[in-house]
Image: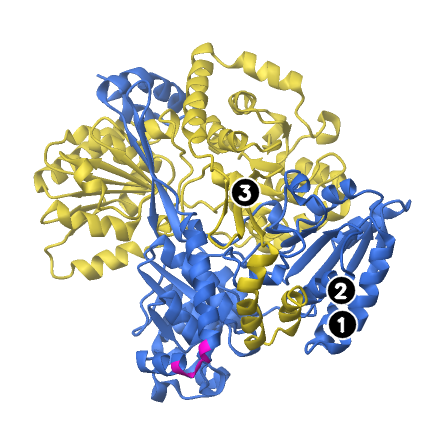
Chain colours: A yellow, B blue
Amino acid sequence: MAIRLDDRAPDFEARFSAFLTTKREVSADVDAAVADIIADVRARGDAALHDWTGKLDRFDSRARGLRVSEAEIDAAVAAVKPEVMEALKLARDRIESHHARQKPGNDRYTDAIGVELGSIWTAIEAVGLYVPGGTASYPSSVLMNAVPAKVAGVDRLVMVVPTPGGEVNSLVLAAARLAGVDEVYRIGGAQAVAALAYGTETIRPVAKIVGPGNAYVAAAKRRVFGTVGIDMIAGPSEVLVIADRDNDPDWIAADLLAQAEHDKAAQSILITDDVALADAVEKAVERQLAALPRGGIASDSWRDYGAVILVESLDGAIPLSDRIAPEHLELAVADPEAMLGRIRNAGAIFIGHHTPEAVGDYVGGSNHVLPTARSARFSSGLGVLDFMKRTSLLKVPPMALRQIGPAAIALAEVEGLGGHARSVSIRLN
Amino acid sequence: MAIRLDDRAPDFEARFSAFLTTKREVSADVDAAVADIIADVRARGDAALHDWTGKLDRFDSRARGLRVSEAEIDAAVAAVKPEVMEALKLARDRIESHHARQKPGNDRYTDAIGVELGSIWTAIEAVGLYVPGGTASYPSSVLMNAVPAKVAGVDRLVMVVPTPGGEVNSLVLAAARLAGVDEVYRIGGAQAVAALAYGTETIRPVAKIVGPGNAYVAAAKRRVFGTVGIDMIAGPSEVLVIADRDNDPDWIAADLLAQAEHDKAAQSILITDDVALADAVEKAVERQLAALPRGGIASDSWRDYGAVILVESLDGAIPLSDRIAPEHLELAVADPEAMLGRIRNAGAIFIGHHTPEAVGDYVGGSNHVLPTARSARFSSGLGVLDFMKRTSLLKVPPMALRQIGPAAIALAEVEGLGGHARSVSIRLN
């Protein structure tokens, strides 16, 4: 049973603050092991990859080859049921057309005194995409990471995916094909991250690494950051549903459980002004849990981290939501548009009764890689900009340098940087 | 004397690769000390700040108060010479008008099947700006960090600056006033980063921390990352000048030294196709070094990390430049525009003979916080987007859910997420 809070209770602020700061993740301390693996891959390249893969994924990658061949990908595509392939294509197309709108425009202009300025966007040349193996291996995540990279114009998109026991995941390979991934390697863990960052005989290095992974992968990404770029380190997923009385409790319960089934550390929160709805949703959750294939996981998540927050008025839901800064926010209220403009911190907002968060996980078109653990206060979901970078341009004609140069010299001098001053003044004399 | 490379030499690739991977920074291992300071500030709040400030900055912040008062800032502004104040205002205005063009537009639209999608940008509510004390305390950096935050719409911009011996830096306070900083605290080091991230009795926490700092500050930022956002961790500065024969060697030498004077670990590189220019620049560097106030630092930097690279043709300069991915790139060539379109990796490009990098440090209008150490391959200079975040919107009407819902259900089922499938199917029955 989830906790219940009520904003009319005198201890509400204390309980809500404690709820906000509850840690949902215990990150294993694997940093020393990861450092060793990375050093080994840097020193021994492919040989190290083969050895770690044999040890951790239990198959002979020397015999199979590190790279997944085009023929293997062809076979994987053929193994996927046609209706699933169609669903993947629909998802791919919708993600592509939405993300195409995120492509930034260059800006170049001349200001009033004749100085030319500009911002020029270019794609990152090579990007690595980490895809987890086993049960956390989701073809939808391949699309969500790979399609924006290709929309951005990344030349070389390199996927790594561990294949425990040598078993490839057909769905993941099919999604990679659909998304335009250029190279696929059957490696995982910290060794795969090291190979992407530093390169080996077989794998050329990339400039940025994205994609989810376990504690080893996260620690390896933190370690190689600087040598390459990395995306955010995602925590357990979460949903906040703001609902008024006019809701089907079964629908709300289904949405809370869709989140809870991800992971024992996932979090589902309902905020409502209607105690009858709160009660009914809680009952519906218990009822649905019994029928859910991943009911055990969902039940643990709901018990340990779930919450039902009663508010006197739905107006009071908005500041609470902004403090939670949910990864996913569902507005199941009569006038969601009125509420929308007042919300500041959320990864993605799902509007109205027919937009369950799960549709956004697959085929809505928006990205499902979103900021977790309150980081929507300061960061955004994955998008095209994550695969591009901006170069600024400056061109000062002689007349304009005469105009602004003296100010540059004055500031350089008070900052004690005589060489800076001189590199301007030498052009004015 | 800087090293000299020549792309016609048989060992060029080996020497250039070695040059690229030269480490210019030895980061002190201060992580354990930083962890202790952060834990102390979290546990004891203001009391810990006072104790660490007394110990490390050697003045009594209990007596002075943590916050720098408006009266102190008024006094600082009054202490700055009028011509310097005017130069700061010119810089502020030019930075502001350039960055105003970076503000992203919201996008909301309905697609062909009636699904509404959107990307909504909002400013981060509260941002902390770290400003180093002592000799690395630059008013220009205050403007470069603070102005884009205010252009983005950050409500609460909180500056921290250590004041060794209790001495405030008038220029830094004046720049803070001009840039619209909302609160200033006289604290620094890991203790200031901890206060910004977790809050104390006096200082409310922020959601993101930006600005340069020493090894303690960098380690503290890495540690609080996740609780708050952070900007990139900047390394030593660098410039690459691509020059043809038609250049005044004194101008080029001045630009190389303007970079070298920053720091012994700074790096200045010249690529040219003209051996006579290369020789003349090297001589001019030696000559100018003697007259430079920071000649000792510049000389060490030039000797240890400087480079002159001769290329057979300037066409060959472009791929080398992209591999270097310089923070600052000057194009001192006859036709810079032709070269411009072929460059992919650079933080900022300074075009033509009258655009020394130093003018961009102060009054060009573009930002001087730029990616160092080859990170322009995957990241951008500081800008308005660093102070904003994007929320995605999705609104699926019932008819559209009927159209795309079955694909979501199919994908949820192959991913083993029955709860996801159910939260869609329950709305279709």
Name the residue rendered at 53%, 63% in the picture: A404
**Which residue is disc 2 drawn over?**
B250
Q: Quadrant of the C terminus of chain A?
A: bottom right
**Which residue is disc 3 drawn over?**
A120
Decide if residue A58 is on the left or right side of residue B181.
right
Q: Is residue B54 above or below residue A145?
A: below
Instruction: Work out whether residue B205 can be spotted.
Output: yes
Between the C-alphas of marks 1 and 3, the distance is: 34 Å
Q: Which amino acid type is shown beneath numbered disc 2?
A: Asp
In the structure shown, which secondary structural element does the residue marked by tag 3 occupy? strand
User: Magenta: predominant secondary structure element?
Assistant: helix
- The disc numbered 2 marks a residue on which chain? B
Q: Is residue B79 magenta?
A: yes
Decide if residue A49 is on the left or right side of residue A103.
right
Q: Is residue A173 above or below residue A152?
A: above
Q: Which amino acid type is shown beneath numbered disc 3?
A: Ile
**Which residue is disc 1 drawn over?**
B288
Magenta residues, start to end: B78-82
Check disc 1: other Cα within 10 Å, few if <14, some if 14-19, many if 20+. Answer: some
Check disc 3: other Cα within 10 Å, few if <14, some if 14-19, many if 20+. Answer: some
Q: Quadrant of residue B180?
A: bottom left
* CB atoms of marks 2 and 3 within 8 Å: no
